[in-house]
Image (cartoon, rainbow, N blue to C red):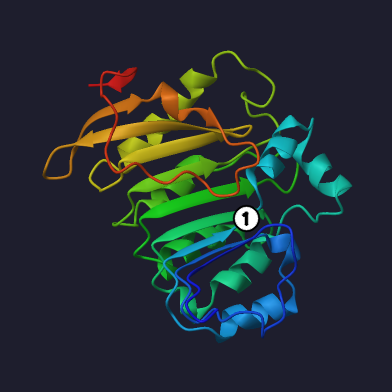
Amino acid sequence: MPALQNVEMAFMKWPPESSFDIEDLSSMRLSLRKLDNAGYHALWSRKDSTDELSLRETLWICWILERSHSTLEAITRSNRTLLLSGTDLLRILDIRSFVALERLEIMYQVDSNDPRMIESVVGMFPQLRVLEIHRYPSHDNERAPMNEIVTMLSRLKELHVLRLNLPSPYHPLRHVKTGRHRVFEKQAQIVADVFRLSQLCEIAFLHENSWATFYIDRHPRGSMTNLFYDKSSHRREFLYVASPTPRSSRPNPTISAVRK
């Protein structure tokens, strides 16, 4: 298959090297639990042609972790095979062939390299237009440093779409259904304020297996004029491997406006 451009592997090991040519791939979606030495070698030896890279599990894994009483307990019960450590993820990302990425999706569990993770992503991939981060805690007392993470990500000047899943054991949305929209609104406002002068136009948060998406209207010069929530965006994607494609046109701004 010399003309192969897209590969998606969720529940299988990396095939033999002779199975297909990955030199001209523009998109790769890989389940890291199945990425063995052959897969690492293939990634290291390929050319710089990939525009999209997804290194995460399917969203039903997120649903399992969200439903668990403790995220850490769920990971431990699975012998930590559900998630890759931040250190191992950095080892994969630190590959010269990915420098031109425009879309990146990552999932990992926090470890000693956590302070470097977001900073490394920003430094390695300055051309990112779509970024999705699933960051899981390493202990049950940890709270995700959302402000610090968002501030660091604001250095990505080409970013249009940001999707965040930053669970913590005592997050108010883990076990309470009511009021979750108000929490999403508050978080979206934090992100929008940090990205006030930027190209960011979509902010999404994961709850169970649904993305709740907020949209930003901007002045032609780039300043934010409106932040609003589209109820139709909060849809379920239970066994859907890939995340939704960013909208090419924004929805009606009259939908549940947060700020005008």
Mark 1: give few (<14), some (14-19) or many (20+) Cα within 10 Å: many
> Measured along the vertical axis of the image, is residue 238 above or below residue 97?
above
Q: Nearer the viewer, residue 12 or 39?
A: 12
Which picture quadrant has residue 256? top left
How many numbered marks appear? Answer: 1
Q: Residue at x 67, y 84 (%)?
A: 17
The residue wearing badge 1 is 56
Q: Residue at x 73, y 38 (%)?
A: 65
Query: Residue 108 location in percent, x, y?
Result: 65, 55
Q: Is residue 118 left or right of residue 222?
A: right
- Which residue type does callout 1 highlight? Arg
The percent position of residue 131, horizontal first and vertical second, equals 45, 52
Which residue is drawn at the image coordinates 81% and 41% (left, top)?
Answer: 74
Relative to the observer, which residue lies in front, 91 or 49? 49
* Residue 244: x %, y % from top left: 47, 43
Q: Quadrant of the C terminus?
A: top left
